[in-house]
Image: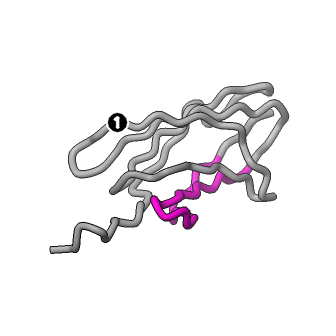
Amino acid sequence: IAPATQVTAPELRSVTVNPATAKAPATLTFSLETNAATSAILLLTEANTTLHATANGTPKDDGLLWRVTADLPDPYKGKVRVFLRDQAGAWSEGELTCTVDVQ
């Protein structure tokens, strides 16, 4: 049993995007599942450009399901990387990515 002061680091369990293909400007909805609460979610392109996004989380089984809406004003084709911030403020990159094609 972990001490009450020890917090579980958030880990990315799954990520999907809908739609994966769109015309710019586009609003994409990412569905993420994490094992624990995260204080923030950051979406980055392969060129380290931050996507403007909003996130809402709801409990699901032993984790959380997040709905993250991101606006892509310009065309972008490639991977979107997911970063999670723990309660102490440290960022970690999720092992999973999503590929998008916004023309």
- Residues packed near mark 1 inside 10 Å, few (<14), some (14 to 19) or many (20 plus): few
Q: Nearer the viewer, residue 15 or 39?
A: 39
Residue 25 lies, in percent from the top left, at: 79, 25
Q: Residue furthest left?
A: 1
Residue 63 lies, in percent from the top left, at: 29, 50
- 78 vs 64, left or right, is right
- 63 vs 26, left or right, is left
Q: Which quadrant does the C terminus fall into?
A: top right
Up the image or down, 48 lies above or below 9; here it is above
Q: Nearer the viewer, residue 64 or 29?
A: 64
Residue at 73% of width from left, 52% of height from top? Answer: 45
Up the image or down, 63 lies above or below 18; here it is below
Is the magenta region chiefly helix, strand or loop?
A: strand
The span picked out in magenta is 78-99
Q: Which quadrant does the N terminus fall into?
A: bottom left
Residue 28 lies, in percent from the top left, at: 62, 31
Q: Which residue is mark 1?
A: 58
Q: Nearer the viewer, residue 36 or 18?
A: 36
Amino acid residing under circle 1: Thr
Residue at 65% of width from left, 34% of height from top? Answer: 70
Residue at 37% of width from left, 41% of height from top? Answer: 65
Residue 78 lies, in percent from the top left, at: 72, 51
- 83 vs 51, left or right, is left
**Splitting the image into 4 quarters, where does residue 66 fall?**
top left
